[in-house]
Image (tube, rainbow, N blue to C red):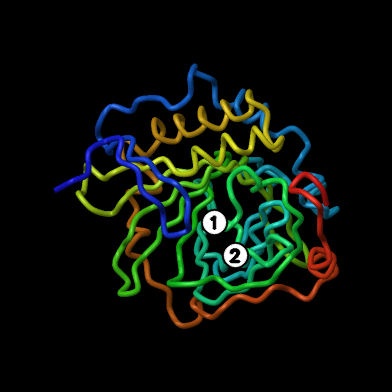
């Protein structure tokens, strides 16, 4: 028996999720008022990225849908950067549609964690963006994932799979349009926007669509990470993602990436590069998420 719309649950990562729709069905907007996608992005891309990335390479990065944006070669190791979060990946494909990468299990990553040793999800919502933090290295846990950054769009799509390799679902991570940089450590840069969508793999053509971390978005406003207007822009981006490709199951949901399998070379774990920018990132810290 399927859960009714409005059901709530907790995701494997510890976030609150609400069953809000099904693919092929009418979508009830989560934003209070319609907002054009470019206006939502403009409100959110407010210069904060430069401070959170804290890397001069970001100033040279080019929007991914620009004709001047660098292209990455199949098999190439790159960094996928969300401000302080730095992840490693290997390129599957890069073309006008967007960038497709594979993150092998065990690949290295670097990111902020609470300075007192708690896991981020162990911090109560009313403190989540206001506790001291330090940087810590870790690895990608569980099966590898295909991750896709559609050119010029403010989201990425992650195809998760179960331990036996069968599809688990698609995670739509709302984030700023990607910027690209080539050089010693090729990378794409973005900023996570807190709110996300999850599309279950079951019930083909009528998959459950869950809204994830709506309560954390409210906490981000309460603790000063986002303004109320910016939070509304994030909700508007969620509406655009559904209307643009989720409701109709179009690209990248219709290209079989949930079933893609790497060969042995592609599945080698990816290491953080030995470059000064990574060394500098390891030493970062702050008294709140708004500092450092």
In percent of width and height, residue 67 lies at 66, 42
Q: Mark number for residue 73?
A: 2
Q: Residue at horizontal 66%, vertical 52%?
A: 82
Residue 146, above or below 97: below
What residue is disc 1 on? 94
Left or right, 210 with respect to 97, comes to left
Tell which residue pokes out farthest to the top in this image: 33
C-alpha separation, residue under disc 1 versus residue under disc 2: 7 Å
In percent of width and height, residue 212 lies at 45, 44
Left or right, 182 with respect to 107, comes to right
Kindly check if marks 1 and 2 are in contact, taking CB atoms under 8 A apart as contact: yes
- Estimate how packed mark 1 is, as few (under 14), some (14 to 19) or many (20 or more) residues with alpha carbons within 10 Å: some
| 125, 29: nearer the viewer | 125
- Estimate how packed mark 2 is, as few (under 14), some (14 to 19) or many (20 or more) residues with alpha carbons within 10 Å: some
| 209, 93: nearer the viewer | 209
| Number of marks in the rendered image | 2
Residue 119's image quarter?
A: bottom right
Judged from the image, the secondary structure of the residue bearing numbered disc 2 is loop
Q: Residue at horizontal 57%, vertical 34%?
A: 218
Q: Residue at horizontal 58%, vertical 39%?
A: 152
Tell which residue pokes out farthest to the left in this image: 1
| 200, 67: nearer the viewer | 200
- Return the disc, 1 or 2, that comes first in the chain's sequence: 2
In percent of width and height, residue 107 lies at 58, 74
Q: Mark number for residue 240?
A: none
Residue 154's image quarter?
A: top right
In percent of width and height, residue 157 lies at 46, 50
Judged from the image, the secondary structure of the residue bearing numbered disc 1 is strand
């Amino acid at each position: 028996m399927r859960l009714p719309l409005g059901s709530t649950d907790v995701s494997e990562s510890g976030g609150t999720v609400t069953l809000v729709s099904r693919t092929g069905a009418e979508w009830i907007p989560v934003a209070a008022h319609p907002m054009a996608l470019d206006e939502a992005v403009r409100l959110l891309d407010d210069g904060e990225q430069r401070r959170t990335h804290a890397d001069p390479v970001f100033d040279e990065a080019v929007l991914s849908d620009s004709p001047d944006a660098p292209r990455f070669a199949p098999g190439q190791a790159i960094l996928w950067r969300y401000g302080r979060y730095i992840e490693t990946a290997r390129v599957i494909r890069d073309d006008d549609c967007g960038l497709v990468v594979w993150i092998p299990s065990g690949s290295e990553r670097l990111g902020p964690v609470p300075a007192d040793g708690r896991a981020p999800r162990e911090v109560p919502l009313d403190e989540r963006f206001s506790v001291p933090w330090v940087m810590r290295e870790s690895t990608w846990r569980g099966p590898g994932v295909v991750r896709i950054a559609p050119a010029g769009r403010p989201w990425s799509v992650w195809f998760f799979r179960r331990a036996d390799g069968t599809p688990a679902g698609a995670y739509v991570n709302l984030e700023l349009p990607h910027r690209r940089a080539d050089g010693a450590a090729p990378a794409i840069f973005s900023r996570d926007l807190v709110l996300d969508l999850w599309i279950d793999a079951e019930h083909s053509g009528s998959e459950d669509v869950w809204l994830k971390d709506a309560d954390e978005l409210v906490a981000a406003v309460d603790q000063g990470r986002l303004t109320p207007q910016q939070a509304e822009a994030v909700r508007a981006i969620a509406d655009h993602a559904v209307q643009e490709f989720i409701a109709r199951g179009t690209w990248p949901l219709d290209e079989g990436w949930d079933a893609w399998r790497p060969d042995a070379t592609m599945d080698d774990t990816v290491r953080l590069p030995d470059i000064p920018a990574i060394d500098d990132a390891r030493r970062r810290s702050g008294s709140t998420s708004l500092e450092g």
